[in-house]
Amino acid sequence: MKQAPKTGLETARLAPRNDSGMNQDTHPLLELSNDAAEVMLHKAMRNSLIIGAVASIILLIASGWRNAAMLMTGALISAGSIFWWQRLARVIRAKLEDQKTPRSAAAVVVFFVLRLTIYAGAIYVSLKCFQGSAVALLCGLGLAALTMVWQALRMLLD
């Protein structure tokens, strides 16, 4: 009689354990190289911009320029956030690996904090000036999370 294939949870329970009770295999995300992380963030930023532009065009045709502008504002903020996370990750990685810290490290950290204020201002201005749907803005803002999860899943499955 054939046995049914084991699920991930059953496999984890049956896997050999070391003295600390943890699986001996490391999680694939922990083995992610710096170059692979850079590529993942770059692709996520690109995909955020593409999805945001296409969705904005569709929304422009379907419900008007105000909602399209709100979605595009959110998409641009999402892509900008990924860009700054990428730069901050480079600085932190250089510190952790005892490499020479980039000259712009202080500027990256300052602008990382400053960008939060700039993005808050962009959100406020878009809500006041465009007077479009806040849902469209939130959808645009959520693109960063969506594309990051998509890229991480693709890397895990490859």
Image (cartoon, helix red, strand yellow):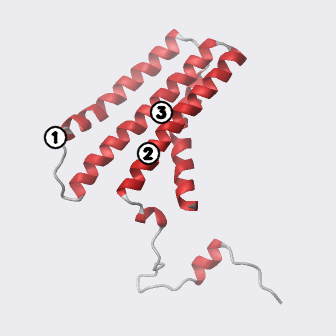
Q: Is the N terminus in the top left, top right, bottom left or bottom right quadrant? A: bottom right
The disc, 2 or 3, on the residue closer to the chain's N-terminal end is 2
Work out whether residue 123 or residue 38 is closer to the camera in this orientation and state it. Answer: 38
- Return the residue at label 1: 103
Confirm whether residue 155 shows in the render.
yes
Apparent side of residue 77 relative to residue 3 in the rendered image (left or right): left
Q: Residue furthest right?
A: 1
Q: Nearer the viewer, mark 1 or mark 3?
A: 1
Point out which mark residue 78 bears: 3
Q: Which secondary structure, mark 3?
A: helix
Q: Residue furthest bottom?
A: 1
Q: CA distance from mark 2 to mark 3?
A: 12 Å
- Type of amino acid under label 2: Leu
Apparent side of residue 66 relative to residue 34 in the rendered image (left or right): right
- Return the residue at label 2: 41
Work out whether residue 35 or residue 149 is closer to the camera in this orientation and state it. Answer: 35
Q: CA distance from mark 2 to mark 1?
A: 22 Å
- Type of amino acid under label 3: Ser
Q: Position of residue 90 (x, y in %)?
A: 29, 47
Q: Position of residue 9 (x, y in %)?
A: 63, 73
Label 1 crowd (10 A; few <14 / some 14-19 / many >=20): few
- Type of amino acid under label 1: Arg
Q: Is residue 132 above or below residue 91?
A: above
Q: CA distance from mark 1 to mark 3?
A: 26 Å
Q: Position of residue 107 (x, y in %)?
A: 21, 34
Q: Is residue 100 above or below residue 52?
A: below
Q: Position of residue 6 (x, y in %)?
A: 69, 78
Q: Which secondary structure, mark 1?
A: loop
